[in-house]
Amino acid sequence: MSGRVNLKALSREDLFRFILERGLPRFRAEQLLHWVYERYVADISGVTEFSKKLRDDLGAVAYLSCPEVAQRLTSRDGTEKFLFRLEDGETIESVLIPDDKRLTLCISSQAGCAMGCEFCLTGSHGLKRNLQAYEIVDQVLSVNRMIRMTEKGRGVTNIVLMGMGEPLANLDAVAEALRRITGLLGISKRRITLSTSGLAPKLAELASKAPDVNLAVSLNASTDEVRSRIMPVNRKYPLRTLLDACRKFPLGPMRRITFEYVLIGGLNDSESDARRLVGLVKGIRCKINLIPFNPHPGSAFTRPSEERVLAFQKVLVKHDLAALIRESKGQDILAACGQLRAAQP
Ligand code: SAH
Ligand code: SF4
């Protein structure tokens, strides 16, 4: 690929510039955008609206990145996990979660993650590198291309940035990716959710750089003591700082912040934890997603019993909090929350 320009690495504006600089008319850029973002073409030679000569000429100076699908696994519950190999050999995972009405794709924002949360498999391997905007978008394009080959018409409808990585630690690339996903792929902001482990100062920046996407915050504990033990980020931005930043986060009408709470047996799953959680989120328009811990090889934590999960939920509901138990899908293929990782060396 050396020397050639990856057209997917260009923003919309830069793509127009690139086309005009080559003496081509503007509509060629429009056509390319259509083929890349609406027809999910894998390479320039597939843009059959262009003459063979034009494809060859463009192909001499440019190309379209297309991550290799190194593995594709289907879970018993219909969830699918894709392992993508990027141009430099790094690997990332995306998870496709179908339900009656939606086709949700959980995408990665980094290869690995630097945040080091104790309960998360992604975190236990450290950060490899940030993803570029196009590498974030490519996950959606590639999955749409694959779906199109098998099931006509239906593409990804919802995006959750809950795969590998801390999206707010790579905010500029994430914001650019979201601009392309909304502007070029046509997925509405209401159907996009970004989940953060709690980089408090970045919340205001998120609101200005990617306004109106849904915010999810991984709380996972009701005291600083426990949270700092399992989420090192809490030592820098403790609960109070994080929740203050959440209170200031601009929410559109009818919008709520989602607080995720991974329930870990004997650690953060008592009824007193639930009561403290009620106090913490007081005054914030929110809902709580309870995620029973998903075990993975090498982890010392356990998943609480169903009774404990229900008892925890009951306390929240009694205090008028919307609290859903989110059974992670795809556990048999390690596709559930916190089970994503790069390929084994
Ligand atoms: N880095 C971001 C988004 C990716 S993690 C974040 O931390 O929010 C997505 C969600 O999975 C987070 O809410 C996280 O707390 C949760 N999670 C991580 N490991 C888990 C595990 N082993 N079981 C259940 N949920 C887990
Ligand atoms: Fe990173 Fe999120 Fe995993 Fe924490 S839970 S290590 S922030 S991916």
Image (tube, helix red, strand yellow):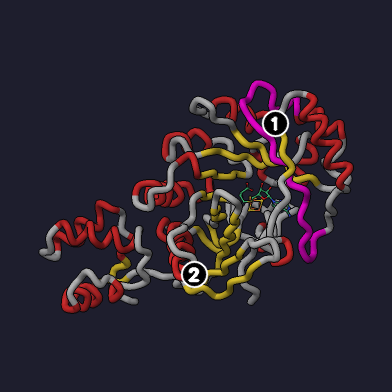
Query: With respect to residue 67, does 38 lie above or below?
Result: above
Q: Which residue is mark 1?
A: 322
Amino acid type of the residue that numbered disc 2 sits on in the rendered structure: Thr
- Relative depth, front residue between 66 and 166: 66
User: What element does badge 1 sit on?
Assistant: strand
Asked if residue 171 can be seen in this view, the reply is yes
- Choose top left, top right, bottom left or bottom right for residue 344: bottom right
Three-letter amino acid code at the position of disc 1: Ala
State the residue at coordinates (77%, 51%).
Answer: 293
Distance from the alpha carbon under mark 2 to that under mark 1: 37 Å
Name the image quarter holding residue 32.
bottom left
Q: Where's residue 328, x and y in %?
A: 70, 53
Stretch in magenta: 278-299
Work out whether residue 58 or residue 149 is closer to the camera in this orientation and state it: 149
**From what the image shows, is residue 182 above or below residue 237?**
below
**Image quadrant for the N terminus?**
bottom left
Considering the numbered disc 2 on the image, is that residue within a helix, a strand or a loop? helix
Q: Nearer the viewer, mark 2 or mark 1?
A: 2
Query: Which dot marks residue 150?
Result: 2
